[in-house]
Amino acid sequence: MTANHHTTAPRTTDAAAIRDLLERGAAAWACGDGTAYGACFTEDATDVTYIGTVYHGGEEIGRAHQAMFDSFLKGTRLILDITDLRFCGTDAAVVVTRGDVRKSGTPEQDGKQGKLGKLATYTVVREADGRWRIAAVQKTQRKPLMEAVSFRFQPATRPSAT
């Protein structure tokens, strides 16, 4: 997992803790451990999947993911590349990632397996116990062809950083 984040020096420890949180989630995914994956979320978290399913709370998120890990997500890895990390006060941050789910290969091969096709926006919060957890995540399937068409015919729709 790499990070191109915007932080100030005093936030370095928090940024590292947030990266660690997302890495723990990816490790739980790779191990097929729904309980550990769900533990990365707050008790009242919201997880909006890229197909539009909405899960509420770490327990439900973990239970649902365990069912997926035991079936069509068995043996997969979650790959995340942090593209932006922005703090909102002292106990909240927004993290934008590019990512994908891969069935085979190693982290070293990821760059050779094509671009990361999914985007996710995480809202993470520091809870009363001092640990950072995911309060919300929205995942979206990237549509590069549609982006290219939009940018070509309406150049003003192109973001400053893509």
Image (cartoon, rainbow, N blue to C red):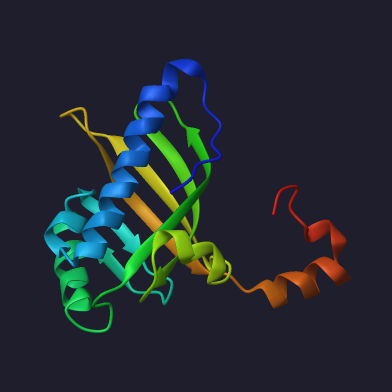
Which image quadrant is residue 62 in? bottom left
Choose between 50 and 28: the one closer to the eye: 28
Where residue 84 sits: x, y (%)?
Answer: 54, 42
* In-image side of 114 versus 21 (left or right): right
- In x, y percent, where is residue 135? 30, 47
The picture places residue 71, in percent across and down from the top left corner, at 21, 83
Q: Is residue 11 left or right of residue 136?
A: right
**Quadrant where the C terminus is found in the figure:** bottom right
Residue at the image position 73 percent from the left and 53 percent from the top: 159
Picture residue at 86% right of the left edge, 70% below the top: 152
Residue 35 sits above or below residue 104 on the image:
above
Q: Residue furthest bottom?
A: 72
Q: Identify the residue at horizontal 23%, vertical 49% (top origin).
A: 40
Of the pair 77 and 148, the residue shown nearer to us: 77
Q: Nearer the viewer, residue 107 or 85?
A: 107
Residue 56 in sight from this viewpoint: no
| Residue toward you, 45 or 147 | 147
